[in-house]
Amino acid sequence: MNAKWLSFLIFLLPLPLIFWQITTQDNGFAFWNVVTVSFGAIAYSYLCFILFLGTRPRWIKYEVAQKFHRVLPILAIAAILLHSQTEEFVNNPHGLHGAGGYGELSQNVFLIMGGLSILFLATKWLRYTPSIVQKFMKMFSFIRYDWMKWVHHLQIFGIIFMAIHVILVNIAYNTPMTAVPYIVYFGVALVFYIPFLLKKFARRNATVASVTALSSVMYELKLHMNSKKHAQLGQAAWIRINGMEHPFTIADVNDDEVTIIFKKVGPFTKKMAQLQSGDRLYMTKGYGKLPKFEKPTIYIAGGSGIAVAMSYIKAWSKNPTQPFHLYWSVRKSDELVYDRYFRQLQQTIPNFYYTPYVTQEGLCERLTYKELEQNLYLEQAQCFICASAKASFAFERMLHKVQADDVHAENF
Ligand SMILES: Cc1cc2nc3c(=O)[nH]c(=O)nc-3n(C[C@H](O)[C@H](O)[C@H](O)COP(=O)(O)OP(=O)(O)OC[C@H]3O[C@@H](n4cnc5c(N)ncnc54)[C@H](O)[C@@H]3O)c2cc1C
């Protein structure tokens, strides 16, 4: 499902709750009641949906689901605040104080969780702040991404408090039936969420075949998968070591052996670099799929973004009828770990074009839109970008400047 359809689904989501609540409640159509019920239903349905999105549903593109998983909490928190403000204009019957308490509790959980997530999980915004803010935030670098992800799961309590709030409100209104769809929404989210959480304790299904250092920071990990049903070429899969789970792209597959190319950037990838052959770990199923190569492909990779590009090249090279142009930009020349491989590929497959850039050494060359403009296939090409958030944004702008319209960007 793409972003448009998902937005439409999200728009529909609160409507049954609003309709049910105002039609089953006495005086339900009173103006302020409709307003406060609507904000409440928006917040509640979005929160249930956020829980569901967190389970990586396969029918929604991972990058799309992730974007909504980040944006929806902001809308939900805004709706909670508006709900609690507008509730004051509603002529409440007696006995709501208990319910109100749970609502407030829920609101506080989400405000705290939202704040912590913005500070420690959604950290990419920090790159655009003044250096003093970045320096200040560095003081908290001992707080690991993985710890925060576990803390993040505590949001479930916020939703539980909200469900209790809704049930108590409806009991107070003498319309307990009204609570039924709210319970159903939460129940459905839990049906997906609980098995997802339990899978985090699943047994190890992969054995390390080898870990090879390609440079001081780039590594190649080969895993032997114990079952036939494993992630496929180009898919993202989560690797779990000691309860911590991180996403990586399957760069190559050979029967039951999968290859992952990774860059050592933090605690988890350091641990991966220290794996020994014979060590066992868990890898989730794969998510996403490769594009078709029925038209020319332009791939712009920045640094370790080459991991994803490699999977595309492996798939494309099985039937290279259309051209493939890889632009690979790295900071230092020792990061060009597949330089020889790509040069050889250029010799053996005439449709393959390769242009490397080293931005902080030698001639300090950078990809420019002028160079892109000269690409003969630009007009018909599908363009992909995989780089850091900042580089990805710059490459995307360049592609739009040269009128490329089929552009897909990913960053990590
Ligand atoms: C779909 C996808 C595919 C990826 N494929 C590859 C790949 O093939 N090769 C590769 O080198 N890297 C890949 N990455 C990035 C890789 O997941 C991170 O480099 C790794 O998680 C860093 O963990 P760390 O503890 O070593 O570093 P940290 O210092 O903890 O993290 C560095 C940054 O990585 C991101 N990150 C950390 N943990 C996670 C997580 N659990 N989920 C999402 N992002 C996280 C955050 O932006 C964080 O700021 C991919 C990321 C995604 C989202």
Image: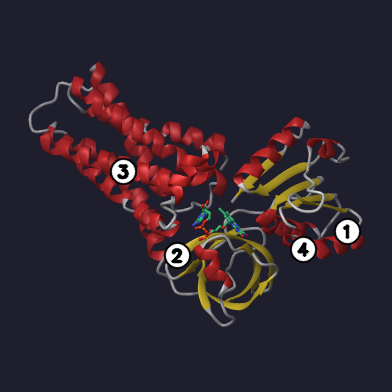
Identify residue for label 3: 112
Task: Tell me if 239 is positioned left or right of 335 in this view.
Answer: left
Residue at mark 4 to residue at mark 3: CA–CA distance: 45 Å
Residues under numbered marks 2 and 1 in contact, where contact means CB atoms less than 8 Å apart: no
The crowding category of the residue bearing disc 3, from other C-alpha atoms within 10 Å (few below 14, some 14 to 19, many at least 20), is few
Q: Closer to the observer: label 2 or label 4?
A: 4
Task: Tell me if 52 is positioned left or right of 375 in this view.
Answer: left
Disc 2 or 3, which lies upstream in sequence? 3
Res. 338 mark: 4
Task: Tell me if 232 is positioned left or right of 18 in this view.
Answer: right
The x and y percentages for residue 47 are 36, 41
Location of residue 251 (image quadrant): bottom right
Q: Closer to the observer: label 4 or label 1?
A: 4
The three-letter code of the residue at mark 3 reads: Ile
Label 2 beta carbon within 8 A of ligand 1: yes
Res. 346 mark: 1
